Each structure stands twice: as C-alpha cells, then as structure tokens.
Image: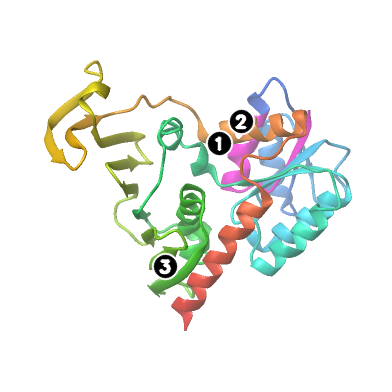
Amino acid sequence: MRISVIGSGHLGSIHAKLLAQNPNVTLVGIVDPDECKGTSVASEHGATWYATVESMPEVDAVVIAAPTLHHHALALACLDRGLHCFIEKPVTATFAEAEDLMRRAATTDCVIQVGHVERFNPAIRSLAAFKLQPLFIEAHRLAPFKPRAIDVSVIHDLMIHDIDLLLWMTGSEVVDIQATGVAVLTQTPDICNARLTFANGCVANVTASRISAKPMRKLRVFQRDSYVSLDLASGAVELYRLIENSALELSHQVPLGTVNTEHGDRVIVYDTPTVESINAIAEEQRSFLESIRTQSRAAVTLHDGAHAVRIAEWIDRLVRT
C-alpha cells in the first residue's frame, strides 16, 4: 500500500518512521510546505518531499498529522483525490468543520480513521474481556509545558483523549457539563477541570493540564462490584472486584476478604490483567490499513472524532465564558 504523511512535525515524524518500517507499506512522500523540515524527514525514511497535496504523486492513503487548523482543508483535498485518510486528533479545529467533513465523506468509499491513540493503549486493551458499565470515572492527564502544542487549548490538545475514552466507555450521550479553566502561559486554557454527566447516569470528573511539573495519565473507573485503576503511561492495570466464591481463580486473583451482601457472601479480589507490550501508534496504523484492506468500519470513526470535538467545544465555551 502506497502512503504519504502530511506534516513533518513531532507526530508526523513518528508516523513516517513506523510506516517506513512496515513491510506492507511503501512510504511515498512527506508533504509539508516547509522544505527544510519536510526534506529532512523524507530523506531519513527513504521518501520524497512534496510541498502540497496537489503535487504529491498517486497514493492509496495519507496520514494527516499537520497542525489541527489545516485538518479540514487537507482532508477535503485528499477525499477529492479518493484517498483513505488517517487524521490525527482532534479531527478538525471546530465541530462545524467536522460536520462538513462527514457530509463530504458520506459521498465517498474512503476509510477515515481518527488518531485517538489511547483506544490502542495496552492498558485499555487489557480490559477487552472485562465488561465496563461505569457509574463514576475520574481522569487526570497532566503534562509539562511544550511550546509545540499551543495551537489549540489544553482541552483540544490533551483532554480530548479522555473525552473520547469516556464517550467510548459509557456509550452514552453527555447531557450536562460543568467546567472551569485558566489560561496561564498561553492565550488559551492551559489547565481545565470538567464534570460530565451522561444520559445513562454516569458522571466523569476530568482534569487536564499542560503546565504540570510531572506527567500523569491515569484513569479510575468505578462501577457496581468493580473498581479499575489504569495508568496509561506505564501500562499498569489494577482490578478490584466483588465475586462469588465459586468464581475465584487463585492462579492470578488475590482474595482480600469477604463481604456479606443481599445475594450472600462475596469475595473481594485483587487482579492485575496481562498487559501486552505494543506500540499504540503502530497498532492504530495496523488497524487503519486493515480497514482499508477489508473495506470495514474504522476502529475510531470520523463520527467518533467529531463527537469528541463537539464535547471539547462545549467545555471550551464554558471555560471562556
């Protein structure tokens, strides 16, 4: 499969490197108006630099990793050429742009996947067999300040990762949001806390900061008879569950005590699921390529990406007013 990467910044370089290592892919080009940066990344990975999408030769698909401000126009240009698109998050700068992109995409057979990479995080994937029915979720995503990421607010830059995870985990619509945030070092919010209420009754408390001394990416999920703690940075997962004695598997579950419930005695067990060591970006690329090959639904759809942008805009609007 012939692929080009649009954007030679931090994420574009990572995508280019992984695609160049993929035996099922030919990395054709790096598209970037900056000749110096584009040529540097292209030569490093055996590709050719092109200044525009229009000057790029025929390919099957593209990875759009340019600044968010340009996602909408670049995606439209690529869809006009019939190209499958992997678009880094946030999928567009505004929800209106995302809606326009959905209307255009509906007239094509192109696969569009949005780069919400945390869906492919090994810690998240270790819960595939675990039934999630969250009642309360607490998320913290903190990072040191990086000047390269200030084209959008902390909500669209960092919090949107957790917004996507919350929408995916709950499978429910957001009906109410309370939020506060502060612009400390930039002209947009650098730290934000939001409380999201979902139609199914779940409540999520989400904090994102890009001015933290130490990084943190943690998610805690509370539901009936279960508590899940995920460290998305280290890949550590801890499960605390209330189960029947007959369901106890001593090989990997540690009993912590017994609780008497209306259904009889239950055992509190501590468990650490097996977390596979994988590169999440390489895995989302693999998923994208498989969707193209089989013409199947993308793992993270354009609708998913647009939904996350809508909620991010809602939070951003509350913070600014």
Secondary structure under the numbered disc 2 in the rendered image? helix
Location of residue 95 with respect to 132 vertically, above or below: below
* In this picture, residue 313 sits left or right of residue 36: left
Residue 255 x, y percent position in the rendering: 16, 27
| Residue under pointer 3 | 190
The residues colored magenta run 1-19
The residue nearer to you, when weighing 146 against 321, is 321
Q: Amino acid at mark 3?
A: Asp
Question: Upstream in the sequence, badge 1 or badge 2?
Answer: 2
Distance, label 1 to label 2, CA atoms, is 8 Å
- Label 3 or label 1, whichever comes before in sequence order: 3
Task: Say whether disc 3 or disc 2 marks the residue closer to the N-terminus.
Answer: 2
**Is 107 contained in the magenta span?**
no
Could you say which quadrant of the image residue 139 lies in?
Answer: bottom left
> Residue drawn 73% across and 60% down?
72
Q: Secondary structure at mark 3?
A: loop
